[in-house]
Amino acid sequence: MEDPVKILEKWISAESYIVVGKDISRVDALDKIFGRAMFTEDYFVDYMIGNALFIKQVLSTYPHAKIKGIDYKKALEVPGVVRVITAHDIPGENQVGYAIPDQPLLAEGKIRYPGEVIALIAAVDFEKAFKASEEVLVHYEPLPYVLDPLEAMRRNDILVHDERGSNIAFTTRVRKGNIEEGFSKAHVIVENEYRLHHQEHAYLETEAALAIPESEGRVTVIGTIQYPHLGQRIVSRVLGVPASRVKIVAPYIGGGFGGKDDEGPLVCAKAALVAYLTGKPAFLIYSREDSIRIHPKREAAIIRYKSGADVNGKLTAIDVTIIHDTGAYANRAPFILWRATMHASGSYEVPHAKVDGYAVYTNKVYQGSFRGFGNLSIQFAAERQMDLLAERLGLDPVEFRLRNILKEGSYTITNQLLDHSVGVAETLKKVAENADWWKKREEYKKFNEASQRFKRGIGVAIGWHGISTSRAVPDWSNAYVKVELDGSVVVYTGIVEMGQGSPVSSHAQIVAEALGVPLEFIRVVQGSTEAPDSGATHASRGTGIGGIGVLVAATKIRERLTQLASRILNVDPGEIEFRDGRVYWRRNPEMGLSWRELVREAYARGIELSATGYFFLPKGKFDDTIGQGFAYPAYSYIVLIAEVEVDTWTGDIRVLRVYPGLAAGKIINPKQVEGQIEGAVVQAIGYTLMEKLYFDDKGNIVNTNFTDYVIPTAKDIPEIYKPVFVEDKYRYGAFGAKGVGEMAMIPGPASIVNAVAFALGVNITFTPLTPWSVLELIGVLKGRCST
């Protein structure tokens, strides 16, 4: 059975599983608990301290200016300084733009935001590198700058990128049906402008890379990166050497959330550049302040949303404008905006839709990948609209959603037919029952009538998220599996471990299931360019898609061993069972041999016990001119119900309880998925209630540390109930799995804000809900009551 589709069909249709779907402890848990797990800085400390050069970055202090000259003579005079590197020293191409070739690795000609990297100082220790960075004198010619995306759209006299002739970096659109007809059928119409803010990734480990030069012009880089093969391509381009001479290794990563998908290749390229030019190992690690100033953020968004529903509670039309503050460089803005545009309806059927999206350059830190990737802000707007429409129609919010929810046979706003794997309606019903939704709504109404200081609310929100890359953009899965003579198994995958557990746990479970061997027999080699290119560890694809190649490779080996066992036992191949380290006849389990015995026999008979697993994801056509067609291979769905308490004296909001439900295909490891949901819920609480980047009048980020950039602590974590799982298997996922990691982040803010709006009886169109903003809302409420 070599056909990957048939392999997937076989495993998806299995009646039961041995380890898939079971709560399995992470294989890396003890190493991380006891400090044995190696992160990038550990490799430097353990092996390179005293031998490697330290790198300090020189950052711009202006939002927009021409670079007239860089004087670093005094920096070179600092004892211990080996070299100062600028754009002119780059041997290859000074271009690292992702979607649009608009971004240099080191600023060249002009700078476009405060914090842009201008030069690299290489010295024998960090103190000398830091001192030398203060001696670099950059001669600027200040230029007019623009910080507001609405102003930037109007201005052609101030251009962040002169060569583009406009500050609009990218546009998107959807045209489905006729919105005039749709709104004419509406009984109620709701229209709002929503404003959502930047978010800092705030990962525990800042960006870092250790580059080691080798013979023949080769270089190895150990770095905090989510996609080693992308890093390989960018380092190759910057150095001007073949990709085969660049090796990238991602060790354990202390949090990524998308930020190290964007900045990871750049930090690797900067360390590699220094190592390549000096011939010495080089180490770069961002301070917390530099990390916050330099690396991309979740997009700030302005969303104008108009939606209508008829007297029967059915949506009739939406008219949406999405404006993203792209910042100085496009990076992944076109893909982020595209995803937001195609998800603008929420997880609902809408017959008439008009959506326009704009990614707009400004002279601020640029936007990038973040858990939820363009979808959080648009689902916030869509889910607020659903609550407001339900209120206007006199319908319960859950009931209104159920009348419009996507199901098998539905068409999305891009006219993509959802022919299977659509479990969101069932999930919503189960979560509402689990949360005792209808009873709590009535209880909290009575509580709020009786209580003056404290108000309580319960809110629901749904998120849907296209899995894999969009449209016909190629996506694949690739892995290599080999069985050693002693029966142990080694798995090679490019998927990276950054806390989510995809390669080290779920991939190991996949192999254990396919080969029937204990988990302790399996070692996963992950996050290296010496493994096959498995695609990026992003877009919630690490297990569902990244695991396909692993499953295909392991199944190929199983089939070869099945044929051998059939000959040895003289039974039909269809009656051979692999389980618990034994291979036996299903009718008589005593008739068999151990896994290790079978492997030794295979080696003796010259049967190959290594295999590559490759799967190219089937996709469809898409017309970008009208935003119609095949958008994503599959969608995962999540429902969150949140309960909150608001202190009207202080403006403080406490999230009391959260009830999650997930429709994401087969759940490979429920315990691991629970952890992903819990982490995303906490991250969503931070975004909704406290996290915000503050910019001064020149675009500088003011709160560049965890004293001033506030994130949740253990005291802020609510009771998070055990999730409801609806296993709506996807035909092209490993065992039918879809994506999980981003899901709870997407509707998290909307569920909390819907609960607060219910508690206070006000319309909320912004985030974050800081105490002072809540007090302003209450003031508005009191003003309305007094009139």
Image (cartoon, rainbow, N blue to C red):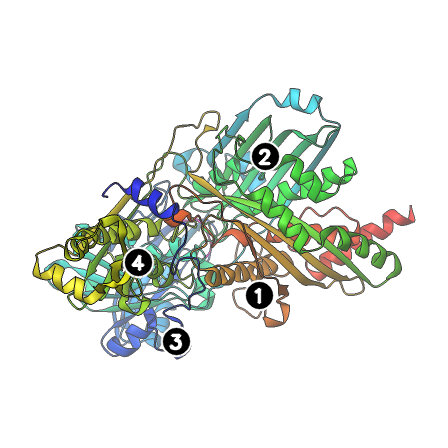
The residue that disc 1 covers is: 711
Crowd band around label 1 with a 10 angstrom C-alpha radius: few (<14), some (14–19), many (20+): some
- Mark 3 element type: helix
Q: Which mark sits nearer the N-terminus, 3 or 2?
A: 3
Numbered tag placed on residue 321 in the rendering: 2
**What amino acid does circle 4 point to?**
Val
Decide which of tag 4 and tag 1 comes sooner along the chain: 4
Q: CA distance from mark 3 to mark 1?
A: 27 Å
Task: Quadrant for residue 162, please give it.
Answer: top left
Q: Position of residue 394 (x, y in %)?
A: 79, 38
Amino acid found under the numbered disc labelled 3? Leu
Task: Name the residue furthest right.
Answer: 787
Residue located beneath label 3 in the image: 30
State the SS at label 4: helix
The magenta span reads 111-115
Residues at marks 1 and 2, CA–CA distance in whole angstroms: 30 Å
Q: Position of residue 443 (x, y in %)?
A: 81, 56
Query: In front here: 561 or 373?
Result: 561
Mark closer to the chain start, 3 or 1: 3
Residue 33 visible in the shown view? yes
**Is disc 2 surrounded by few (<14), some (14 to 19) or many (20+) residues within 10 Å?**
some
Q: Which residue is mark 4?
A: 511
Asked if residue 221 shows in the view, the reply is no
Residue drawn at the location 30% of the way across and 41% of the way down: 6
Distance CA(mark 3)–CA(mark 4) = 21 Å
Q: Of label 2 and label 4, which has the lower sequence position?
A: 2
Nearest-to-viewer mark from 3 and 2: 3
Return the residue found at the far left: 605
